[in-house]
Image: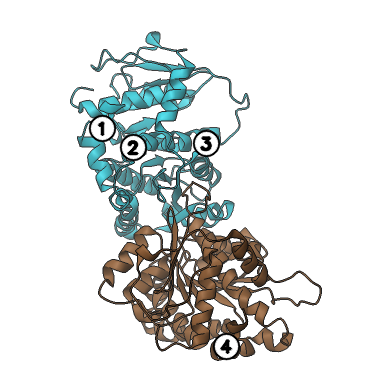
Chain colours: A brown, B cyan
Amino acid sequence: MVGFSAAVIRRQQFLVRCLVGCNISSKNLSYTTIKMQSVVSGGSPDFAISILRSITPSLDSSRHKGQAGKIGVVGGCREYTGAPYFSAISALKIGADLSHVFCTKDAAAVIKSYSPELIVHPILEESYSVRDEDKKSISAKVIEEVDKWMGRFDCLVIGPGLGRDPFLLDCVSDIMKHARQSNVPMVIDGDGLFLVTNCLELVSGYPLAVLTPNVNEYKRLVQKFYKVKIGGVTILRKGGSDFISNGDLVGAVSAFGSPRRCGGQGDILSGSVAVFISWPVSVLLNGAEPESYGYGVHRRVCFVEKSCFACI
Amino acid sequence: MVGFSAAVIRRQQFLVRCLVGCNISSKNLSYTTIKMQSVVSGGSPDFAISILRSITPSLDSSRHKGQAGKIGVVGGCREYTGAPYFSAISALKIGADLSHVFCTKDAAAVIKSYSPELIVHPILEESYSVRDEDKKSISAKVIEEVDKWMGRFDCLVIGPGLGRDPFLLDCVSDIMKHARQSNVPMVIDGDGLFLVTNCLELVSGYPLAVLTPNVNEYKRLVQKFYKVKIGGVTILRKGGSDFISNGDLVGAVSAFGSPRRCGGQGDILSGSVAVFISWPVSVLLNGAEPESYGYGVHRRVCFVEKSCFACI
């Protein structure tokens, strides 16, 4: 964790506390390997509720469209259309104002048909629809399209229903690099984790990344990088108990949820986490001018360079 | 029935008992012609309930995605999209964790749009969209795509909304052969029964096949093969009373259901039967490692070679 600003570290801790719903001590800020023995669980429900209250945007008439969160989901291909839908719609149901999906052309019409509330961009391409000589130009066009929107998002979700097509994954790698350059927080789930497992540099050392692997995805991550520290990210390992760690502190959530383990539940979590990441920013910027907030420039500067979380 | 392992015979009896909901004696295991005179009906409802309880996966937090059943439906073409949807969605509603559909490209977008909960693979082709010289390579590609998933399924449903296109049916024949080689159980309904009526070898002697004909489909099967024993499969003949037989024992279900006979009811049954086939396996493997279970390898070995059902 050494090397990141105190503000970013505080933000990460804040996020962990929000998700875990318990009071984690912040005495040790140095980077250590993940110690499951040091799991902190339980804590005061009142504290969790007070944190949630403090980050949940108030419903008053002074707010403008977008101030309660603008989420972008990168996922959806010929095979998978349900996963990005569940992720994007759950962001709206949690309380975000706007939810976008960036997917392939094949997937777009179907995802649009699930709900008129989503804004769906048919911009990704899979190998089967692209000639080799066109790959470079198409890849550049994809990035150009996503970049138009990048600064407006409070959080991106990378991976639900992304599939494993090599060309598509290359394009998404580029999107992740641009998101990182623009300091946009990212929740990485599903096939996005496959991408990260094969290229750790995409997130390593990026404090605004949250990985949400299930037990098997987590094992694959650990098996691939058991000698390497996945530094500076937050990992939310789903399971009977969910474990959440920023590499230093580990929290556990064992609260009872649905005992079914059907497809789509992880996607719902990813969209929800994205909103919980976006809300603290929204709270901090409540006093900011809507027009500057709308383009996200002020927010990024504020978020990364200033010690915004000191006051929480 | 001679020639199959005792474990497989026990499994079949178990399945028949589950579906019939009555206590059938298992004294005579030798193959005999189907004797409708020997129908067993009635029995103890308590026994039926205890069997259903014993195969229904418990809803506890120790389970992982997929352990309550992964079903694949092969069906859906330019004309028919509702049938595969009803079959696949009923599998989810009964309690399976994941439900896939393998259909033509024309059908895929429509079936996807019915529900984001289904995973729909647009891989089948009909004659009108394929040139003769491409048929061999396209057929090989279809099999390759299905084979990627084959080992993961606990049961396949073959036939809902499949249509009668000769090229498509040839591809589905190949899928059935591969499923059989991989010891994947199959429920065969609708146009899948047309396929079987024209090529009995696809299922004959395969103890993991369940045919679900209505009265007319059953008549066509019998007329075509009245001199041939359809050995080693389970037949569920739908009607005012449903008759279920493995060629040795016959059960009847006369419980009151909907008196309407609208389209789609048989598809709902096929998806439901697929889940009831997958659950006993899931119960047996409750203690298996999720990763080995996930790829289905352990399950197949366990299912076919070991006497798993001895303990039930």
Q: Which residue lies under the disc numbered 3?
A: B268
Same subunit under labels 3 and 2?
A: yes
Mark 2–mark 1 CB contact (< 8 Å): yes
Camera-side mark, 4 or 3: 4
Same subunit under labels 2 and 4?
A: no
Q: Which residue lies under the disc numbered 2?
A: B281
Tell me which amino acid carries mark 2: Val
Q: Please state which of residues B219 and B290 is positioned toward the viewer in this rendering.
A: B290
Q: Which residue lies under the disc numbered 4?
A: A307
Tell me which amino acid carries mark 1: Cys
Circle 4 marks a residue in which chain? A
Quarter of the picture containing the C terminus of chain A is bottom right
Mark 1 element type: helix
Tell me which amino acid carries mark 3: Ile
Residue B19 x %, y %: 43, 25
Q: Please state which of residues B243 and A156 is positioned toward the viewer in this rendering.
A: A156
